[in-house]
């Protein structure tokens, strides 16, 4: 539902209903909704074990 924009250092990615995005969560990023409409996100975090 809705649209959002993910911003990265050199790139902006527009996402709409049904879109997916995979990226290294340690990379600097932002997410925003520039519309008047609500946007719904489903986020999954995959964590690596540390020593």
Image (spheres, rainbow, N blue to C red):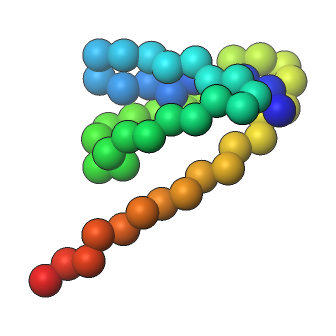
Quadrant of the image for the N terminus?
top right
Vertical order, 35 against 18 (above or below): above
Q: How many marks?
A: 0
What residue appears at the point 60 percent right and 52 percent down from the top-left corner? 43
- Location of residue 11 by image quarter: top left
What residue appears at the point 44 percent right and 40 percent down from the top-left corner? 22
State the image coordinates of residue 44 (x, y, percent, origin top left): 55, 57
The reply, left or right, for residue 44 in relation to residue 8 is right
Vertical order, 42 against 32 (above or below): below
State the image coordinates of residue 48 (x, y, percent, origin top left): 29, 69
The reply, left or right, for residue 21 in relation to residue 48 is right
What residue appears at the point 42 percent right and 63 percent down from the top-left corner? 46
The reply, left or right, for residue 44 in relation to residue 19 is left
Quadrant of the image for the C terminus?
bottom left
State the image coordinates of residue 14 (x, y, percent, origin top left): 58, 18
Vertical order, 3 against 50 (above or below): above
């Amino acid at each position: 539902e809705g649209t959002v924009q993910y911003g990265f250092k050199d790139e902006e990615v527009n996402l709409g209903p049904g879109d997916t995005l995979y990226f290294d969560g340690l990379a600097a990023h932002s997410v925003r909704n520039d519309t008047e409409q609500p946007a719904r996100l489903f986020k999954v975090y995959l964590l690596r074990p540390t020593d």
